[in-house]
Amino acid sequence: MERKTTLAGPSEAESGLPARRSLPVRLSSWWLDKNLGKEFWNFITVSFLFDSGMFIFFLLYNLYLLDLGFRENFLGWTAGAMALGNIAGSLPCGRFTQRFGLRKTLLVCLSVVPALCAFRAIFTSGPWLLALAFLGGAISSLWAVAEPPVVAQITDERHRAFGFSVVFASGIGFGILAGLVGGYLPTWLSFVPFGAARIGGKRAALLFGCGLAALALWPASRLKFKAPPAGEKRHYPRNRFVFRFFPALAVWSFATGAFAPFFNAYFARDLRMPVERIGAIFAGAQLVQVLAILVAPAIFRQFGLITGIMYTQFACAASLIWLAAGKGGWSSVVAYSGFMGFQWMSEPGMYTLLMTRVQHGERAGASALNLLVISGARAIAASAAGLAFTRFGYPVVMIAVGVLIFLAGCSFRLLLGGESTEPLSGAREKCAAAREAGAA
């Protein structure tokens, strides 16, 4: 009888090769390898409560002001006051963090910011609302200053970048949930006697968001950090690159800051959408942002950082002009989602570009200057745009802003197109090696 031959090789056990693991097992092993411990997940809980509460508040606050009888010019002044507060608070909050430590910084932020927002939901006097917006912007800088060193402390060096990615992506995910819930909260809480029916539901929802944010105090009190190291002298970069980068960043920040604070007012007043649908659109745009952030690395690998940033900003400009030309419906939803997605897609590229072109000891100073430029540009933009929307209407101003975003993309290419994206440390090593080779 003829013997059948087999093409199969030796079994995995006979060959000595490790057995193939199933996909769930491999994913579990990959996740456990990231070494994200208890403190990390405590901070994620803090971020969930605080970010969700603040997302609900800012989703509904402009609509609440419109119900009180304020117009877009006052909405612009409010956004500008908050941005000015960010500017005034950035450096003092940095010194506060260095002196009192991360834990006390978080506890102060999580107790004061929700309280100030609650006052903003109760008071109805314009000057008081502007003053509270300024104070809220200043104190909320504590969160922006403390979050990066907190994540750095609760992750190891090998997996720090992954930890930042999880925190960043989860923050957007919290916005999706808050947008879906926040749009329905005024209806669910309309029975609460906080004024007229239309105002009372929104006011109750705003206070609910403040209370949710304040609940973050409990997990924050359980966070434990290492003793802070001896204070290091902060150095600010003064190289050729930053003098080209920050003007381009200022144009971009001014352009995007001219529309972003008014999206809910635009949908409510110009497109006549109910608050429930605005909340759903906001949540959908947050999901698009997550997808855009996942795609961004491939864009930058394909075209390079500077060209990739320019292309994403061109797409952002086109989306806003499309939104301005729309008449509502799905076209406006897709256009707004594109605007938000392309806007956030370029942000990681710009931050990466800045961090690679300054020395290690200058990164903290560069980050502080970055915050000051963004806050300053957005403060001016919000105030100017509020007046422009009141006088000229939304479509005309939005088209002008879209053109300005296009010019911002051009400025990145013109000002930074000749700049290398190689880290300064790597460039210095190559120069040193070249000198040694020449000497040999």
Image (cartoon, helix red, strand yellow):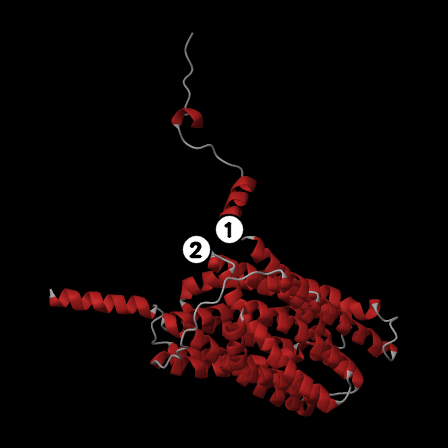
Q: Which residue is mark 1?
A: 35
Q: Amino acid at mark 2?
A: Arg
8 displayed left or right of 262 = left
- Say what secondary structure mark 1 lies in: loop
The residue closer to the viewer here, 31 or 266, is 31
Looking at the rendered structure, which numbered label has been put on residue 410? Answer: none
- Quadrant containing the N terminus is top left
Q: Amino acid at mark 1?
A: Asn
Q: Residues within 10 Å of mark 1 (few under 14, many from 20)?
A: some
Counting every numbered tag in the picture gives 2
Q: What is the quadrant of residue 23 in the picture?
A: top right
314 displayed left or right of 391 = left
Q: Where does the image place residue 114, in percent across and percent down from the top left?
A: 69, 74
Q: Residues within 10 Å of mark 2 (few under 14, many from 20)?
A: few
Q: Which residue is mark 2?
A: 158
Q: Where does the image place residue 380, in percent across and percent down from the top left?
A: 57, 88
Q: Residue furthest left?
A: 440
The residue closer to the viewer here, 265 or 240, is 240
Asked if the residue at tag 1 contacts the one at tag 2, i.e. Cβ–Cβ closer than 8 Å, the answer is: yes
